[in-house]
Image (cartoon, rainbow, N blue to C red):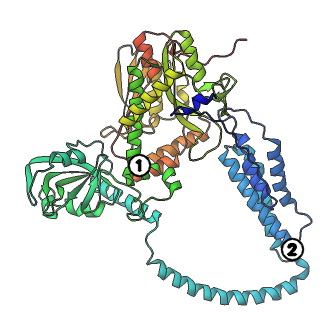
């Protein structure tokens, strides 16, 4: 760099670093670590049905583990230790193989080896037939000692049980208690998972509306307020997504409309429940703005408690793994993601105003390019092609410049199979933009404008294979797709679907066996899909398990049981409507394009023969 250039106040530096690490260990557990470290090649083709070839080193490492099961020269205590280590290693190996998606047939030999190892260990405990008399004497002596030990253990167990009575209930016990309340509500004719709730005001709107209004002890009796919140027992500070307000329940006031309302409030609610409350606004004697409830409604019964009120959710790993809890209990985290959304929308708005077009480019590449980075590899079954996830959007965007678009950009996800640190993640969001007839000085000016702007923003009827379908719901859906869907030319909402084909939808409130779902069709194609989202965690688990059974039976399109989602759902999801719109198909409709490839700039194609 020239000397005069070093005085520039804003220095732009591009740095590329490579980190190579080697794992060395001489302990007897080295084979286990090596197997775990070298297993990822088994996942190199997550979309492929062909069996991948494991790395040679991985095979060698697994062979070392199997050597423990062949400890023919070991005897006595050494042999027992060797077998126990081998059993532990084999168990870890099996768990690792399951995580990598091994099928039952390939797993069977490993399970057989584990059972054989356990059988060998059990054989060490059998008495020697040549020393029966000595063994009998030892056995009698051992039995007498065991009786004394059992009496001592029984006394200690009794003391432990009495001390356990003073321990707080476990998470499973709390969950069972809350689900029992769900059953109690249904038995009483109440709905623990509401379909919708009409709110008149948010917390922030109420605080703003009544700022500098109402004297201490004064109540606004003319305006009725409907408010939903993450509730607490008996009232107190509660909040929604906009802020916190005080909520007050009074036994006499609630009893004016329903004599059991206050009793049910105490019996059915727990911290973390989502409830709706209707009432008037008053200011307490201490000046606190309060929603004085006249009635309340359970919107979502939480099956799991919130983190401890005082210690909270402080473990950084738990916060990342349980982001839904992190967002509930840490307002600052919600504020961070709120700002992120505003930043990205500001970025897009600025680029659009400057004449840039955002055009989507492929995520699956036949050849990685645009950066120096190790890509994630995958495989396309139908096309029989090795593919990688994109490491940059640069090359396709430049091809758009060549094609005649003077200013283009894309804000999207990039994937690089590299290390993780506080500043690096294998999957990340990036914006790349390209402007014709400009140089890097123009890009510097544009960068300053964009960053400043973002900072400011902070078969019977012709249906094939119908005889193979197992329920009326599947038959109904198959008949619709074969006989009706192609004829829906005008924009049409098709409503209320069978529960069998809608595993994430809420049950229809008046039609058993159906769900609250619609799809939008036009020109014989699906354009949009929407649900009243299922919020009952027990019902959701049952549907996932039904899907998992189909998947185990060979249905490649069926889903499995997503435990992380179920755990989040047990925390409590408010009544929710979901909508998905297919942008490509919508663009086809609006541009009168006959093929989806006509509206995708770079569709994936097989290479020329």
Of the residues under marks 1 and 2, which one precedes in the sequence? 2
Secondary structure type for disc 2: helix
In depth, the one of 568 and 554 nearer the eye is 568
Circle 1: is it few (<14), some (14-19), or many (20+) Cα within 10 Å?
some
Residue 289 spot, x, y in % from top left = 17, 55
- Residue 152: tell me if it is visible: yes
Name which residue lies at 38% across and 25% down.
Answer: 349
The residue labelled by disc 1 is 333
From the viewer's perspective, is 90 left or right of 270? right
Residue 186 spot, x, y in % from top left = 31, 54
Q: Is residue 136 above or below residue 547?
A: below
Q: Quadrant of residue 269?
A: bottom left
Name which residue lies at 58% across and 41% down.
Answer: 425
From the viewer's perspective, is 470 left or right of 301? right
The residue labelled by disc 2 is 76
In depth, the one of 407 and 316 nearer the eye is 407
Q: Which quadrant is home to the N terminus?
A: top right
Circle 2: is it few (<14), some (14-19), or many (20+) Cα within 10 Å?
few
From the viewer's perspective, is 487 left or right of 37? left
Residue 214 spot, x, y in % from top left = 9, 53
Residue 596 spot, x, y in % from top left = 51, 15
- Residue 538: tell me if it is visible: no
Q: CA distance from mark 1 to mark 2?
A: 58 Å
Q: Is residue 272 above or below residue 520?
A: below
In depth, the one of 138 and 200 nearer the eye is 200
Tag in front: 1 or 2: 1
Q: Is residue 85 above or below residue 529?
A: below
Name which residue lies at 51% across and 22% down.
Answer: 441
Q: Which quadrant is home to the C terminus?
A: top right
Secondary structure type for disc 1: helix
- Count the labels in the image: 2
């Amino acid at each position: 760099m020239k000397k005069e250039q070093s005085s520039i106040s804003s220095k732009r530096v591009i740095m590329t670093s490579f980190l190579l690490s080697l794992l060395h260990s001489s302990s007897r557990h080295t084979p286990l670590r090596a197997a775990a470290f070298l297993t990822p090649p088994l996942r190199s083709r997550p979309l492929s049905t062909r069996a991948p070839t494991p790395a040679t080193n991985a095979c060698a490492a697994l062979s070392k583990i199997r050597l423990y099961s062949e400890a023919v020269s070991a005897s006595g205590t050494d042999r027992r230790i060797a077998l126990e280590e081998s059993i532990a290693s084999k168990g870890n190996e099996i768990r690792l193989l399951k995580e990598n998606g091994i099928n039952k047939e390939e797993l069977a030999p490993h399970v057989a080896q584990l059972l054989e190892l356990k059988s060998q260990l059990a054989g060490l405990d059998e008495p020697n037939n040549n020393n029966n008399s000595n063994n009998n004497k030892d056995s009698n002596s051992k039995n007498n000692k065991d009786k004394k030990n059992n009496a001592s253990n029984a006394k200690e167990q009794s003391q432990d049980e009495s001390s356990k009575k003073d321990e707080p209930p476990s998470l499973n016990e709390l969950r069972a208690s809350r689900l029992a309340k769900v059953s109690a509500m249904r038995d009483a004719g109440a709905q623990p998972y509401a379909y919708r709730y009409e709110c008149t005001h948010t917390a922030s709107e109420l605080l703003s509306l009544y700022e500098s209004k109402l004297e201490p002890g004064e109540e606004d009796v003319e305006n009725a307020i409907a408010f939903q919140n993450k509730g607490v027992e008996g009232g107190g500070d509660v909040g929604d997504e906009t802020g916190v307000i005080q909520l007050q329940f009074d036994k006499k006031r609630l009893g004016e409309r329903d004599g059991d309302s206050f009793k049910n409030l105490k019996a059915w609610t727990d911290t973390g429940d989502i409830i709706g409350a209707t009432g008037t606004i008053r200011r307490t004697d201490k000046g606190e703005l309060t929603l004085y409830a006249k009635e309340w409604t359970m919107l979502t019964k939480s099956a799991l408690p919130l983190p401890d009120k005082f210690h909270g959710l402080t473990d950084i790993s738990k916060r990342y793994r349980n982001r839904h809890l992190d967002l509930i209990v840490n307002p600052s985290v919600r504020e961070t993601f709120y700002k992120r959304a505003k930043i990205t929308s500001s970025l897009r708005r600025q680029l659009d105003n400057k004449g840039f077009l955002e055009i989507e480019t492929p995520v699956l590449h036949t050849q990685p390019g645009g950066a120096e980075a190790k890509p994630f590899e995958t495989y396309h079954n139908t096309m029989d092609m090795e593919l990688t996830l994109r490491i940059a959007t640069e090359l396709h965007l430049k091809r758009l410049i060549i094609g005649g678009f003077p200013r283009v950009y894309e804000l999207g996800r990039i994937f690089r199979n590299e290390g993780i640190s506080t500043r690096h993640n294998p999957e990340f969001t990036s914006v790349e933009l390209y402007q014709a007839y400009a140089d890097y000085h123009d890009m510097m000016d544009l960068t300053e404008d964009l960053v400043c702007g973002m900072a400011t923003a902070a078969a019977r009827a012709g249906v094939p294979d119908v005889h193979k379908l197992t329920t009326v719901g599947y038959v109904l859906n198959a008949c619709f797709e074969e006989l009706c869907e192609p004829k829906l030319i005008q924009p049409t909402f098709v409503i209320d679907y069978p529960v069998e084909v809608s595993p994430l939808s809420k049950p229809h409130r008046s039609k058993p066996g159906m769900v609250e779902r619609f799809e939008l069709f036009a020109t014989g194609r699906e354009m949009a899909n929407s649900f009243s989202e299922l919020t009952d965690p027990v019902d959701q688990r049952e549907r996932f398990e039904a899907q998992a059974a189909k998947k185990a039976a060979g249905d490649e399109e069926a889903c499995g049981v997503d435990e992380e989602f179920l755990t989040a759902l047990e925390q409590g999801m408010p009544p929710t409507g979901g909508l998905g719109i297919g942008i490509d198909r919508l663009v086809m409709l609006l541009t009168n394009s006959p093929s989806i490839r006509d509206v995708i700039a770079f569709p994936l194609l097989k290479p020329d023969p």
